[in-house]
């Protein structure tokens, strides 16, 4: 089974780590808080303490140049199978969207948050997709998992999105001198 590992750290450290393992396909991306290094492999990762995920569904090839949106879906353990089943039953139109590059549904191995990882050619493509019915239906289906009734309580999943770009020049790191240019 193919896994995806995510290491999180400073831009400098992630660049050093990527350079150390040039033979591995690792994708470096940044936002104004931190940088991530994505390692998709069916072997053991080179990272010491990454977030670990099984790839449940995928489309397209992840590329080193692009804009990444990671939608975190925080679920209770009891909701995992229902989430995956509903995800697989839903029609997906994302691959037809302009600027779409790749997609991964990631099952957590050392966490409770699923990740819906999408890659786009740019931020505009992702923002345009967020205005579509496909996006609205996807978000609604993620939230429906909260209808599981456990001990007479409904547990709503928590959704949040983090975005990253592979172009370090597009990132404005707060409280740092811009020594990278």
Image (cartoon, rainbow, N blue to C red):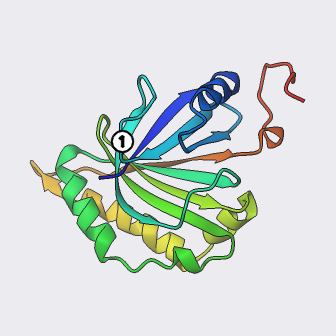
Horizontally, is 181 left or right of 41 in the view? Answer: right
Q: Which residue is the extreme one toward the front?
A: 23
- Residue at the (30%, 34%) spot, across then down: 110
Tag 1's secondary structure?
loop
> Is 18 positioned to the left or the right of 148 in the image?
right
Q: Is 67 situated above or below 27?
A: below
Figure check: 28 above or below 105:
above
> Percent x, y for residue 8?
54, 29
| Residue situated furthest right in the rendering | 181
Q: Is residue 10 visible?
A: no
Q: Is residue 33 visible?
A: yes
Q: State whether residue 70 is above or below residue 59.
A: above
Residue toward you, 106 or 62: 62
Residue under circle 1?
43
Q: Where does the image place residue 163, in percent across and percent down from the top left?
A: 62, 47
Does 21 appear above or below 132?
A: above
At x 56%, y 39%, the residue is 23
The image shows residue 150 at horizontal and vertical percentages of 12, 51
Q: Quadrant of the C terminus?
A: top right
């Amino acid at each position: 089974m193919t896994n995806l590992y995510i290491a999180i750290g400073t831009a400098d450290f992630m660049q050093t780590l990527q350079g150390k393992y040039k033979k591995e396909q690792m994708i470096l991306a940044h936002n104004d808080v931190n940088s991530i290094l994505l390692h998709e492999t069916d072997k053991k990762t080179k990272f010491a303490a990454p977030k670990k995920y099984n790839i449940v569904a995928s489309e397209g090839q992840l590329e080193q140049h692009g804009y990444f949106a990671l939608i975190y879906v925080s679920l209770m353990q009891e909701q995992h199978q229902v989430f995956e089943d509903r995800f697989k039953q839903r029609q997906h139109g994302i691959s037809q969207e302009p600027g779409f590059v790749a997609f991964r549904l990631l099952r957590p191995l050392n966490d409770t948050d699923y990740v819906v990882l999408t890659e786009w050619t740019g931020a505009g493509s992702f923002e345009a997709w967020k205005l579509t019915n496909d996006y609205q239906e996807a978000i609604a289906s993620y939230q429906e998992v909260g209808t599981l009734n456990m001990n007479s309580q409904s547990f709503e999943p928590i959704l949040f999105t983090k975005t990253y770009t592979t172009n370090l020049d597009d990132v404005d790191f707060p409280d740092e001198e811009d020594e990278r240019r």
